[in-house]
Image (cartoon, rainbow, N blue to C red):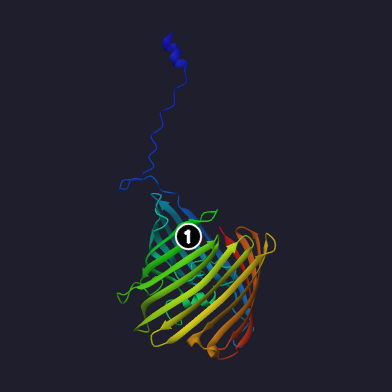
Amino acid sequence: MVAATLMLLPAMAAEPAENNSEVEYGRKVTDYVSKPKFGGYFIGRYSYSDQDGAKGGAGFNQRLIRAYVDGTILNDFKYRVQIQTNNNSFHMKDFFVEWQRYKFAMIKVGQFKRAFGFENPMNPWDISTGDYSIFTKKMTGDYKGDTWGGGGRDQGIQVQGDFLKVGEDKHNLFHYQIGLWNGQGINTSDTDGKKDLIGTIQVQPIKNLYVGFFGWTGDYYAGGVEKSCNKYAFGVKYDDNDWTFRGEWAHAQYTGQGNDDAWYLVAGYCFTDWFKLNGEYQTYRNGKSWRTAQCMYSLIPEFQLHKNLKFQIQYNWNNNRSSAVDKHYNELWAEFYVRF
């Protein structure tokens, strides 16, 4: 009878295993791996220019197509691999792993953005304009005159972190980054055994308002000749709710090639949930001379119909005093952005 009664009782659930929050390291450990996240986006553009010799501009073209995979291993290690193509140019963009156990001292190694400027590390989707500023292209490139083909990237190691929480919202007052890079740019090994030292210290007095100082010193090979550069920059960034504001100024000194400087201002406001209006002013001076200054004034209406779909129209008036032909000309860009 007792046996029959026991057979009718529901089986008791097994005792749950003891929760062990401490992750063990070892070559046989297979747990604590996130599912890889695959994604990407593309930006298409139609561009028109009335500059003499431009033949109406580039017309329809790929601004960029990117695909990436990222994830975490052992909870503490974040990784990313990102590739890009521009028309017929296919190349590796990012590959890195970052140890993130301590938010005040995270260590990243691989190929990634240099820690110089607020705009440089931003995603093209988030910069509020149809392209990165002349400041970013000239001041975060590999050397003087660089066309920023590497997108401000290099191979190296970096320590970064946030600390000292303040205010009712407990935001971090300070952010820093400091690292060593090869100095030769994207997808390139070191050529002289020397490294570029680049860093930033940023203060966040109120949430989402950053004031930053950036410094860079290093050596590079250009045209078979070893040269050195020293750069520094100041910037302010605010992006919250309906408002966007960003401004930066930088000075660069190159061995035997003189000094350059550059600056820009971007401001934007969301009038509705789907319509935002942005404006930008920017200048780059080769040799810090107004005779060679490249200035651009832009108006950029933006229509974001979905989190992963938006359209931009950008009008640029250029005052390019370094041009050997038409120094004053107009441009019109029409771009569409799609994420997946």
Task: Give residue 316's quadrant in the image.
Answer: bottom right
Q: Quadrant of the C terminus?
A: bottom right
- Name the foreground residue: 340 vs 159: 159
The residue positioned 47% from the left and 20% from the top of the image is 10
Three-letter amino acid code of the residue under disc 1: Tyr
Residue displayed at 38% across by 44% down:
31
Residue 313 place in picture, x, y as percent: 65, 71
- Judged left or right of residue 327, residue 150 is left
Q: Residue at x 41, y 32 (%)?
A: 16
Q: Is residue 69 left or right of residue 41?
A: left
For image coordinates 70% across by 61% down, the residue present is 272
Task: Give the camera-side residue of 187 and 165.
Answer: 165
Decide: few, some or many residues near mark 1? Use Cα within 10 Å; few <14, some 14-19, many ≥20.
Answer: some
Q: Is residue 212 left or right of residue 28?
A: right
Which quadrant, please, contains the N terminus?
Answer: top left
Q: x%, y% of residue 289?
A: 52, 88
Q: Position of residue 181 (x, y in %)?
A: 37, 70
Give above or below for 19 relative to 105.
Answer: above
Res 246 quadrant in image: bottom right
Kindly indicate the quadrant of the structure image that contains residue 283.
bottom right
Number of marks in the image?
1
Q: Position of residue 212 (x, y in %)?
A: 49, 69
Please state which of residues 25 and 149 is positioned toward the viewer in this rendering: 25
Q: Secondary structure at mark 1?
A: strand
**What residue does disc 1 label?**
68
Please identify the residue farthest to the top as the structure is shown.
1
| Residue 270 in sight here | yes
Near-viewer residue (49 or 217): 217
